[in-house]
Image (cartoon, rainbow, N blue to C red):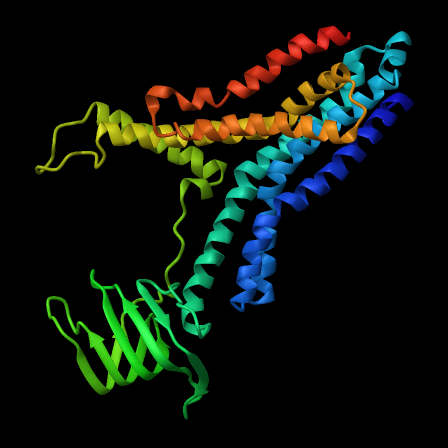
């Protein structure tokens, strides 16, 4: 690598690195706010760190392409303004040679983006949803906070003025709740429970309340009135599903799983279009043709969506370098705004096309490639102008 290429590469990497750090911090604010909520609920440090680590791939999926775009505009805008690009051309260096190192970086970042989009981000999303599910389920039992309704428990909201954590003779913990008010929605209607005090403990997936001086309105479905008790045991079955797991969704599939699901959906669609004779009065496929087409369209779109997102790094460098030379903007703030605007427009179109993912007639798996086509066409116009 010659001196000129090292100079271009060093300038480009420094600008991209600094921009990436700034954007990573900005885009991490939402995750940090979620982490702050977990900490307020009393989540362990291990879970918090695991949640942050699982969030990092999704943040990098945004920041890397945007950082490359901003770096392209800043570095080559400055070089063009300082006549460095013109000097290189005068020495016989072609514009494609000037672009070579940034383009190689863009290709490598696109390869990294493919890994992030198809493996790291799905896994991270699954881990984050699992952690959030776990904390939400545990919070209602272990982290009763006096003075506010705890509604993380499935179909049960609990309020108390104060609480005391206790341990019985067998070493098992329980919580005494004072001035209890609970709203139970488990049976399809609202049941209000009031008690001067209550002992609350978890038994497996159930919550057991021992109510003292209690009133339940209504006592059961279809019964009008209030039932009062000096002491009453009230069991809420399966409201804290400790064995419940967050089930994977297409967003959580890695590339291999998503490709297998898309091929399976295609077979279901073909079967729905040409169904074989019914057996024992039952259809051969559980999905109608319309439902099968929507499901296949969604999975096929997601495959292409991830590929387009991964290619954004290369596209941004391909467009950003000649655009930076054309713009000749020396001010870093203007270059930052310009780069972010182009990047956000690119991503916004991708996200808007996601709204059509379940509409096969719109061909969303092809529509999502339009920003890439526009970038290549723009590069084909701008690069010759800089030769």
In the drawing, does residue 60 fall left or right of residue 182?
Answer: right
Residue 372, relative to residue 189: is it above or below? Answer: above
> Between 108 and 77, which is closer to the camera in this rendering?
77
Q: Which residue sits at x=84%, y=31%?
A: 10
> Residue 230 appears in which quarter of the rendering?
bottom left
Question: Which part of the image, by quadrant, shows the C terminus?
Answer: top right
In the drawing, does residue 339 fall left or right of residue 296?
Answer: right
In the drawing, does residue 301 fall left or right of residue 69?
Answer: left
Q: Position of residue 111 (x, y in %)?
A: 63, 31
> Between 277 and 358, which is closer to the camera in this rendering?
358
Q: Position of residue 138 (x, y in %)?
A: 43, 67
Residue 56, relative to residue 218: is it above or below? Answer: above
**Residue 307 showing in the rendered view:** no
> Residue 363 appears in which quarter of the rendering?
top left
> Between 385 and 120, which is closer to the camera in this rendering?
385
Label total for image: 0
**Residue 358 showing in the rendered view:** yes
Q: Position of residue 224 (x, y in %)?
A: 12, 71
Q: Which residue sits at x=44%, y=88%?
A: 171
Q: Which residue sits at x=74%, y=24%?
A: 73
Q: Position of residue 68 (x, y in %)?
A: 70, 30
In the drawing, does residue 66 fall left or right of residue 198?
Answer: right
Question: Which part of the image, by quadrant, shows the N terminus?
Answer: top right
Q: Which residue sits at x=60%, y=65%?
A: 45
Please identify the residue farthest to the bottom as the structure is shown. 169
Residue 193, relative to residue 312: is it above or below? Answer: below
């Amino acid at each position: 690598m010659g001196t000129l290429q090292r100079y271009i590469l060093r300038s480009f990497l420094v600008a991209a690195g600094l921009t990436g750090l700034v954007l990573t911090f900005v885009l991490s604010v939402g995750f940090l706010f979620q982490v702050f909520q977990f900490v307020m609920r009393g989540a362990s440090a291990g879970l918090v760190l695991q949640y942050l680590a699982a969030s990092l791939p999704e943040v990098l999926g945004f920041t890397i392409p945007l950082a490359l775009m901003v770096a392209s505009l800043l570095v080559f805008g400055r070089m063009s303004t300082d006549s460095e690009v013109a000097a290189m051309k005068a020495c016989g260096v072609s514009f494609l040679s000037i672009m070579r190192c940034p383009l190689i970086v863009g290709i490598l970042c696109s390869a990294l983006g493919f890994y992030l989009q198809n493996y790291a981000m799905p896994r991270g999303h699954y881990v984050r949803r699992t952690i959030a599910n776990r904390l939400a389920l545990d919070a209602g039992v272990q982290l009763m906070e006096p003075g506010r309704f705890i509604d993380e428990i499935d179909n049960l909201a609990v309020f108390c003025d104060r609480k005391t954590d206790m341990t019985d003779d067998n070493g098992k913990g329980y919580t005494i709740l004072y001035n209890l008010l609970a709203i139970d929605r488990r049976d399809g209607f609202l049941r209000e429970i009031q008690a001067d005090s209550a002992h609350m403990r978890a038994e497996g997936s159930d919550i057991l309340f021992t109510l003292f001086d209690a009133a339940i309105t209504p006592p059961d479905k279809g019964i009008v009135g209030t039932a009062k008790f000096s002491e009453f045991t009230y069991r809420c079955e399966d409201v804290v599903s400790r064995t419940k797991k967050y089930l994977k969704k297409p967003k959580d599939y890695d590339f291999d799983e998503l490709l297998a699901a898309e091929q399976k959906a295609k077979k279901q669609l073909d079967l729905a279009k040409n169904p074989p004779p019914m057996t024992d009065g039952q259809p051969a496929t559980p999905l109608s043709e319309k439902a099968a087409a929507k499901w296949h369209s969604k999975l096929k779109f997601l495959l292409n969506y991830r590929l387009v997102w991964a290619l954004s790094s290369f596209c941004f460098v391909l467009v950003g370098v000649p655009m930076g030379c054309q713009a000749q903007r020396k001010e870093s703030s203007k270059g930052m705004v310009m780069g972010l605007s182009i990047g956000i427009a690119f991503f916004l179109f991708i996200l808007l096309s996601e709204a059509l993912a379940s509409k096969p007639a719109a061909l969303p798996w092809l529509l999502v490639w339009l920003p890439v086509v526009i970038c290549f066409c723009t590069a084909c116009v701008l690069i010759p102008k800089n030769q």
